[in-house]
Image (spheres, helix red, strand yellow):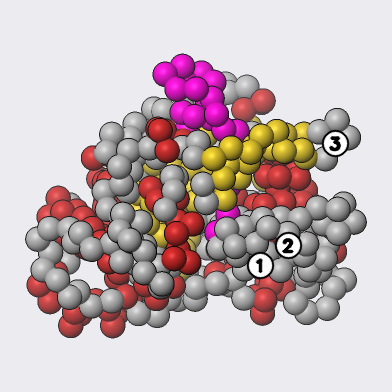
C-alpha cells in the first residue's frame, strides 16, 4: 500500500516492515537502491521497500486503528471501507485499494483478527499492518493518513476516511490530474484538497502525487514543528505561525465555504492533520488544486518561491462526474431554511461522496426502514444512510459476514456507540502524538 511507516506524531523505532498484498509478490533482492525509501523520524532511519502487486497507476487508501479482538467500536469503520470498495468496483473503478491498519496497544494479537483479514482480502483490499503504538489516540492515528505520500508505486493516491462512502466512481479525479490520461483534459493539479464549511482543508478526502521528495518535505515539516512545539506551552501550537506560515506577515488569507478572509490558524484540526495537509500541499509542494464548494483554485510555485494562484474556475468537475447514487442535503430539491447552509455541498466532487461524521455514522444508529431498497428522500443524509444499509446487506451476503440485520437495533448500535479513539484530535493528546517528551 504505502512505501513507508513514519510515526508522524508518534515515536518511531527502527522496525522491519512487512507488506501483505492480496496476491503476495516476492521482493526482488536485486532491486536498485533508488527504490528503497528512507524516512527520518526522531533522527533515526527507517528503510522500507516500495510496494509490489500494483495493477493500476492509481490507488484509494484508508486508515483503520484501535483494532482489538474484544472490542466492536472499529467494526463500523471496517464495514464502511468494505462497502466503499464494493461501491467503487460496481461503479467501474479500476484503481487499487490499500488499507493501513494498527492494532490497539493492549491487543494480544500480532496480526489482524482472522475474520477481518479474510473480509478485506476477499474485497480486494491490500493490507499494510503497522506497528502497535505504545499509546493510541485519534490525534496520533490521523497522521497515518500522510503515509499515502510515500506510496511511490502509484502516480496518484486518494485517501478516504472510514466514515465516508463514494456515491460515484471517483477515478475521474485521477484522470483530470494526469496528462497521460488522454481521454480527458488535464484540468487540475496532481495534489488536491477540499475546503469545508469553516476549514480550508478537510482531510476526509484528499489526493496526492506520491514521491520520495514530497514525503521528505512532510517529514521535515513535522520534525520542525515538533521541535518548536516543545518550547510552547499547552496546547503546544502557535495559532499565528501555525505549521510554518504567518498569514498576516505575508498579507495572505485563506478561504473556506463560509469564510473568505481568515488570517489565523484557527479552524478545526488546524493543529493536527487538517492544518498540516493544508500547509504541506499549498506551501511546501505548491502544486495543488483546492476545491471550495463549486470554486476550483489551482496553485503553483511563483517566481519568488511563494505559491501563486494559477487559475480560479467554477464547476470544473461537473461535466465529468456521473450522477450520484443518491442525493444529500436536499441538493436535488427545493431548499428549506435548515438546508440552505449545506448548499455548498451540492457541487462535484463534494456531492460525489457521503461523509457521515460524528454520531451520524449509520452503525451507531437504529434502523427505521426495511433494508429492501434505497430511500430517495435527500434531506440531510437520509438517503446516503439508507444506501449504506442496503450495501451492508449486500456484502453481508456476498462475504458471509454473519451480521444479524434482522435484529440490528437490539444488537449493534449499543456495541459501537462509543468510538475507542473519540471523534477528534484533542489538544490534550498532542504531547503524546507529537512525541514532545521523547
Q: Nearer the viewer, residue 114 or 247?
A: 247
- Residue behind mark 3: 305
- Helix, strand or loop for the magenta stretch, by majority: loop
Q: Residues within 10 Å of mark 1 (few under 14, many from 20)?
A: some
184 in the magenta segment = yes
Please give the residue where the numbered disc 2 appears in the rendered image: 262
Above or below 315: residue 401:
below
Left or right placement of residue 37 versus residue 320 in this view: right
Numbered badge on residue 267: 1
Magenta highlight range: 174-196
Check disc 1 and report its element: helix, strand or loop: loop
Choose between 363 and 118: the one closer to the eye: 363
Q: Nearer the viewer, residue 399 or 242?
A: 242
Badge 2 element? loop
Q: Position of residue 118 (x, y in %)?
A: 26, 51
Callout 3 crowding tier (Cα within 10 Å): few <14, some 14–19, many ≥20:
few
Residue at point 40%, 33% (across, down): 319
* Residue at the image position 69 percent from the left and 72 percent from the top: 430
Q: Magenta includes 164?
A: no
Amino acid at each position: 500500500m504505502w512505501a513507508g511507516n513514519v510515526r508522524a506524531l508518534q515515536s518511531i523505532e527502527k522496525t522491519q516492515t512487512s507488506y501483505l498484498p492480496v496476491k503476495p509478490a516476492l521482493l526482488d533482492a536485486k532491486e536498485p537502491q533508488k527504490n528503497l525509501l528512507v524516512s527520518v523520524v526522531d533522527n533515526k532511519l527507517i528503510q522500507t521497500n516500495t510496494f509490489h502487486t500494483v495493477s493500476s497507476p492509481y490507488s484509494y487508501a484508508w486508515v483503520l486503528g484501535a483494532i482489538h479482538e474484544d472490542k466492536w467500536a472499529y467494526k463500523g469503520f471496517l464495514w464502511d471501507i468494505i462497502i466503499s470498495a464494493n461501491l467503487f468496483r460496481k461503479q467501474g473503478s479500476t484503481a487499487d485499494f490499500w488499507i493501513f491498519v494498527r492494532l490497539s496497544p493492549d491487543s494480544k494479537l500480532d496480526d489482524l483478527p482472522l475474520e477481518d483479514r479474510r473480509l478485506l482480502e476477499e474485497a480486494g483490499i491490500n493490507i499494510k499492518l503497522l506497528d502497535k503504538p505504545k499509546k493510541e489516540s485519534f490525534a496520533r492515528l490521523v497522521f497515518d493518513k500522510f503515509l499515502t505520500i510515500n506510496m511511490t508505486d502509484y502516480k496518484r493516491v486518494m485517501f478516504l476516511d472510514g466514515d465516508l462512502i463514494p456515491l460515484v466512481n471517483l477515478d475521474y479525479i485521477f484522470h483530470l490530474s494526469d496528462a497521460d490520461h488522454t481521454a480527458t483534459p488535464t484540468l487540475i493539479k496532481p495534489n488536491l484538497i477540499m475546503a469545508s464549511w469553516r476549514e480550508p482543508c478537510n482531510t476526509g478526502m484528499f489526493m496526492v502525487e506520491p514521491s520520495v521528495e514530497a514525503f521528505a518535505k512532510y517529514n521535515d515539516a513535522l520534525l520542525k514543528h515538533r521541535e518548536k512545539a516543545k518550547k510552547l506551552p499547552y496546547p503546544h501550537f502557535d495559532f499565528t505561525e501555525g505549521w510554518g506560515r504567518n498569514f498576516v506577515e505575508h498579507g495572505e488569507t485563506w478561504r473556506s465555504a463560509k469564510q473568505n478572509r481568515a488570517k489565523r490558524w484557527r479552524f478545526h484540526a488546524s493543529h493536527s492533520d487538517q492544518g498540516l495537509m493544508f500547509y504541506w500541499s499549498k506551501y511546501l509542494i505548491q502544486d495543488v488544486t483546492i476545491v471550495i464548494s463549486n470554486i476550483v483554485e489551482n496553485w503553483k510555485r511563483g517566481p519568488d518561491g511563494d505559491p501563486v494562484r494559477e487559475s480560479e474556475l467554477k464547476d470544473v468537475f461537473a461535466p465529468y462526474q456521473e450522477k450520484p447514487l443518491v442525493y444529500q442535503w436536499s441538493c436535488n430539491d427545493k431548499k428549506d431554511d435548515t438546508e440552505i447552509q449545506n448548499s455548498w455541498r451540492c457541487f462535484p466532487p463534494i456531492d460525489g461522496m457521503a461523509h457521515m461524521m460524528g454520531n451520524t455514522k449509520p452503525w451507531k444508529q437504529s434502523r427505521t426502514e426495511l433494508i429492501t431498497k434505497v430511500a430517495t428522500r435527500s434531506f440531510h443524509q437520509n438517503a446516503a444512510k439508507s444506501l449504506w444499509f442496503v450495501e451492508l446487506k449486500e456484502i453481508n451476503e456476498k462475504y458471509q459476514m454473519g451480521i444479524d440485520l434482522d435484529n440490528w437495533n437490539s444488537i449493534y448500535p449499543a456495541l459501537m456507540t462509543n468510538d475507542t479513539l473519540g471523534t477528534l484530535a484533542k489538544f490534550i493528546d498532542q504531547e503524546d502524538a507529537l512525541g514532545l517528551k521523547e
